[in-house]
């Protein structure tokens, strides 16, 4: 992969800027293939104790040329690589909309209990009562937190939850003789997964204008009239939205949507900001998903083993995926597939149990007061930073003097700094030199940075972030060129991201 990356910046600065270990002094790690040490090997296979049989040569082929390498070398290789990764456990990671918060280690303890860790998906219900009870209890918690009574734990990520819930909504309309409802409305600040999930369900998406970050109700009504009220299936909204604002008109919007027989879908990615404060079911949502990795401190799915449970209103319950975890009259738990109107399976077995255990543990460890405290602290932290930076970094949706505060994240469009000839990329790359991960860029509006500190950071870290942002602004004022090679203190300074995506080098040796 080395060819797709530019060399680290040559200039070496002093340590004033950063209190983290200097990474640039270390050489680029050779690949494991370059560590070939003939004569060594990492494992000893047991002696052959079955009759030997020869496979045909053409079936075996030449085979890959694996490096000879010892076990300790393998461990060191991957340990070194992991130490060069930029992660939340090492540094501040204020990625807007993606809620990168600390995952307490008690979650790992619970998930590694043998009864959960070694459960087999084909085990008999009788033998996994504890596991089923945990999933059932988690469903109850999620129902209560969202104010929507029926929960499915099958979906594997937030985006997958959107898809599943939209399938449920489509099935509901089909069942009620309204399969013409295939138009979904979403604000123009919607996350990319919203239109993608609609497309996967065969629905078309129409963007509703936002004004000052909020859904423009007049535009919503105009689009409903234009598309035909009987063709609208749902309005999909993220609240608080991706501009970091809670749309207080949500109940009014829900009334407009319900009046035409359509449903309200709540993208729950930002639930961290409202836990214990308000519930989607109470402000008009008929269905929602949770991103447990954003709200309940579970590992991020990254397309892999994640979790995105959905919660829906009573009347949508019959359509939820199967198998469902149910509680029987005698107090036992079982997996039930006896739901004739269900949309069926959306993934294997009952979902990602390791993540479910972490989610359950976190909710139990926090308790109701702890969950409410999360929302309060997350919102306070974001407003604290916004208030300290807004004189230098313009914020279109934040004005403390006018009582315009943000929710859990804030957006800045630093026009004055960009006018000095630097790019957003230059600014965020310099943050890496201060041991801070770049915030989200160019979304939900062009030329913006969106930062979400979350509730888990200390005042010292928040202050360090503000100091770093202000120091970068000063650098730009005095010499914009000075940040063009940032970061100076990283193993890889500026990746050729387009090249890495378009021409990935996936084999060794190349070619
Ligand atoms: C993160 C996010 C999603 C997608 O969630 P995944 O769990 O990553 O699939 C959807 N909508 C919003 C607003 C998000 O921030």
Image (cartoon, rainbow, N blue to C red):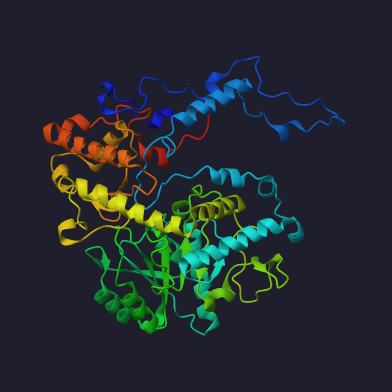
Q: Residue furthest right?
A: 51
**Coordinates of residue 267 in the picture (x, y in percent):** 42, 63
Q: Is residue 219 left or right of residue 105?
A: left
Q: Residue at coordinates 24% horizontally, 36% vertically from top-left?
A: 468
Give the quadrant of residue 89.
top left
**Coordinates of residue 500 in the picture (x, y in percent):** 41, 38
**Coordinates of residue 109 in the picture (x, y in percent):** 59, 43
Q: Residue at coordinates 15% horizontally, 39% vertically from top-left?
A: 421
- Residue 267 seen in the current view: yes
Q: Is residue 337 left or right of residue 440?
A: right
- Which of 377 and 94 lies nearest the eye of the viewer? 377
- Which of 104 and 339 lies nearest the eye of the viewer? 104
**Coordinates of residue 18 in the picture (x, y in percent):** 30, 28
Q: Is residue 236 above or below residue 82?
A: below
Q: Residue furthest front?
A: 369
Q: Residue at coordinates 53% horizontally, 77% vertically from top-left?
A: 314
Q: Is residue 490 left or right of residue 306?
A: left
Question: In which quadrant will I find the N terminus?
Answer: top left
């Amino acid at each position: 992969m080395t060819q797709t990356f530019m060399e680290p910046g040559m200039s070496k600065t002093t340590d004033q800027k950063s209190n983290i270990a200097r990474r640039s002094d270390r050489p680029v790690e050779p690949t494991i293939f370059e560590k070939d040490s003939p004569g060594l090997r990492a494992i000893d296979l047991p002696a052959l104790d079955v009759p030997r049989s020869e496979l045909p040569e053409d079936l075996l082929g030449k085979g890959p040329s694996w490096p000879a390498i010892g076990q300790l070398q393998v461990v060191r290789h991957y340990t070194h690589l992991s130490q060069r990764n930029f992660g939340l456990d090492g540094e501040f990671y204020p990625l807007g909309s993606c809620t990168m918060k600390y995952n307490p280690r008690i979650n790992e303890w619970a998930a590694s209990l043998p009864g959960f860790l070694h459960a087999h998906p084909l085990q008999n219900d009788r033998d996994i009562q504890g596991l089923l009870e945990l999933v059932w209890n988690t469903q109850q918690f999620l129902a209560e937190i969202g104010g929507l009574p029926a929960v499915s734990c099958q979906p594997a990520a937030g985006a997958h939850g959107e898809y599943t819930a939209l399938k449920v909504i489509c099935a509901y309309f089909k069942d009620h003789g309204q399969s013409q409802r295939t138009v979904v409305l979403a604000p123009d600040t919607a996350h990319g997964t919203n239109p993608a999930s609609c497309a996967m369900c065969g629905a078309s998406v129409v963007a509703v204008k936002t004004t000052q970050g909020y859904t423009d109700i007049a535009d919503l009504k105009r689009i409903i009239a234009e598309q035909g009220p009987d063709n609208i299936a749902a309005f999909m909204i993220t609240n608080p939205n991706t501009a970091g604002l809670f749309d207080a008109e949500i109940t009014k919007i829900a009334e407009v949507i319900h009046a035409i027989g359509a449903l309200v879908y709540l993208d729950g990615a930002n639930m961290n900001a409202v836990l214990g404060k308000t519930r989607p079911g109470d402000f008009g949502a008929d269905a929602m998903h949770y991103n447990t990795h954003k709200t309940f401190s579970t590992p991020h799915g990254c397309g892999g083993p994640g979790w995105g449970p959905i919660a829906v209103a009573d009347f949508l319950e019959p359509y939820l995926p199967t198998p469902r975890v149910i509680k029987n009259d005698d107090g036992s738990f079982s997996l039930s597939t006896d739901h004739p109107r269900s949309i069926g399976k959306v993934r294997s077995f009952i979902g990602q149990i390791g993540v479910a255990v972490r989610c359950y543990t976190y909710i139990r460890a926090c308790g109701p007061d702890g969950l409410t405290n999360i929302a309060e602290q997350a919102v306070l932290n974001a407003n604290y930073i916004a208030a300290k930076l807004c004189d230098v970094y313009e914020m279109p949706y934040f004005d403390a003097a006018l009582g315009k505060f943000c929710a859990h994240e804030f957006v800045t469009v630093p026009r004055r700094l960009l006018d000095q000839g630097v790019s957003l990329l230059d600014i965020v790359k310099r943050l890496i030199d201060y041991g801070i991960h770049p915030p989200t860029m160019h979304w939900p509006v062009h030329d913006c940075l969106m930062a979400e500190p979350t509730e888990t950071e200390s005042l010292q870290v928040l202050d360090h972030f503000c100091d770093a942002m202000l120091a970068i602004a000063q650098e730009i004022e005095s010499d914009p060129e000075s940040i063009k090679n940032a970061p100076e203190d990283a193993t890889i300074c500026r990746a050729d991201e387009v090249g890495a995506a378009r021409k990935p080098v996936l084999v060794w040796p190349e070619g």
